[in-house]
Amino acid sequence: AQKVTQAQTEISVVEKEDVTLDCVYETRDTTYYLFWYKQPPSGELVFLIRRNSFDEQNEISGRYSWNFQKSTSSFNFTITASQVVDSAVYFCALSEADQAGTALIFGKGTTLSVSS
Amino acid sequence: DTAVSQTPKYLVTQMGNDKSIKCEQNLGHDTMYWYKQDSKKFLKIMFSYNNKELIINETVPNRFSPKSPDKAHLNLHINSLELGDSAVYFCASSHRILSYGYTFGSGTRLTVV
């Protein structure tokens, strides 16, 4: 069975601190896809990144970076020099098959609060 | 131009009523979805359609019925609304190849009183 665990329910940091959001997944498939989404207070779901199971290269996009480690089934997300605008709920998600209609299985989310 | 649009954004209704939420996407995607986000922010899939064909029908009460008149639209009709149906409902769409991720609508906050 597939499962995504985000053990950190809430994290509070002060602006300019670095913060890492953890994501651990379970799947029996050898091919799968991992995602991160951001849900700001306005409520929309914003796509951040997709990672294939066969591509373990880490990725950096501005202040955001992602660390994918198959050995520990983790796909962690780090925000460097956090800003107040980073305050949001962040969701990690997993898809086991690359075909039409496949569900994204979401973790329960981590609420990040960045104070000035 | 909104890629995935849902209407209405807010819906307040009484128990027992029937209501519909509309969803349209202009991305040319083949696949559309309905997700429910509960009060604890947990997101769970309800339905997915590919080219108007039902692919996923999770264990939801049969009071919920999706309807896809064409591949750009996926509406959600709910009969005999109950208090527990209060949630945010998200529509989403994707290419047939899911690896590009979903594009979500802005959500419909349903409150049943």
Image: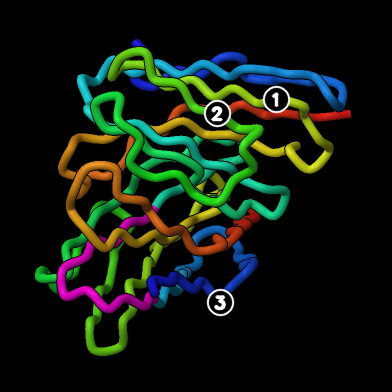
Where the N terminus of chain A falls, by quadrant?
Answer: bottom left
Residue B33 visible here:
yes
Same-chain check, marks 3 and 2: no
Q: Is residue B78 left or right of residue A67?
A: right
Tell me which amino acid carries mark 1. Answer: Asn
What percent of the width, then of the height, locates residue B84? 78, 43
Residue A20 visible here:
no
Give the residue at mark 1: B79
Tell me which amino acid carries mark 2. Answer: Ser
Could you tell me how far apart the alpha carbons at marks 3 and 2 are, in whole angstroms?
34 Å
Tell me which amino acid carries mark 3. Answer: Ala
- Graded by Cα atoms within 10 Å as few (under 14), some (14 to 19) or many (20 or more), the crowding at tag 1 reads some
Please tell me which residue is depicted at 15% across the width and 43% down the height of the picture. Answer: B97
Q: Is residue A27 magenta?
A: yes
Could you tell me how far apart the alpha carbons at marks 1 and 3 are, in whole angstroms?
36 Å
Q: Magenta span covers which residues?
A: A25-36
Of badges 1 and 3, the one in the foreground is 1
Q: Is residue A68 left or right of residue A30?
A: right
